[in-house]
Image: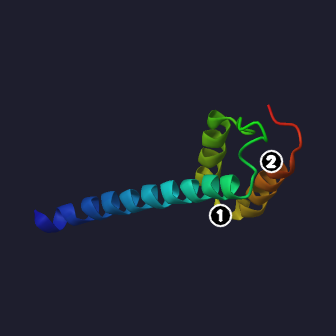
Amino acid sequence: MLKSCQPIVFCHQESFVLRWKQRIAAFLFVWFLEKNGILYRPDSSKKIADNALVALMLMIAESKPEEKEMMIKVVVNLINLKIYY
């Protein structure tokens, strides 16, 4: 019985580790935006809405490794965008 449960526990542990890696990556991205003056306008309002940041993080997290270059371009274009809603 114990041996039959090991793959299930291993998969669960792997998904747990993956979720934490994604959360850490999302935190570091938002931290990078804030430290580089990209997250806030001069009047302290956010340039990028919270729901847009969440959507961006989910899109990056769900992207395939072969889509890496496209994801980089999306993020760079978003950062370089002068008009924020």
Above or below for 84 versus 58: above
The three-letter amino acid code for the residue at tag 1 is Pro
Report, in whole angstroms, how far the alpha carbon at label 2 lies from the one at label 1.
20 Å
The percent position of residue 43, horizontal first and vertical second, equals 76, 36
Comparing labels 2 and 1, the label whose residue is closer to the camera = 2
Res 27 → quadrant:
bottom right
Locate the N terminus and report the quarter of the image it occupies.
bottom left
Query: Residue 20 location, x and y as percent?
Result: 43, 58
The numbered mark, 2 or 1, whose residue comes first in the sequence reads 1
Q: Which residue is mark 1?
A: 65
Q: Nearer the viewer, residue 67 or 5?
A: 67
Location of residue 28 by image quarter: bottom right
**Left or right position of 32 against 20:** right
Question: In the orientation shown, which residue stands out farthest toward the bottom?
Answer: 3
Q: Which residue is mark 2?
A: 78
Q: Is residue 3 above or below residue 47?
A: below
Q: Secondary structure at mark 2?
A: helix
Q: Amino acid at mark 2?
A: Leu
Q: Could you tell me residue 80's position as x and y percent? A: 86, 51
Identified at 30% across, 65% down, the residue is: 10
**Residue closer to the observer: 12 or 32:** 32
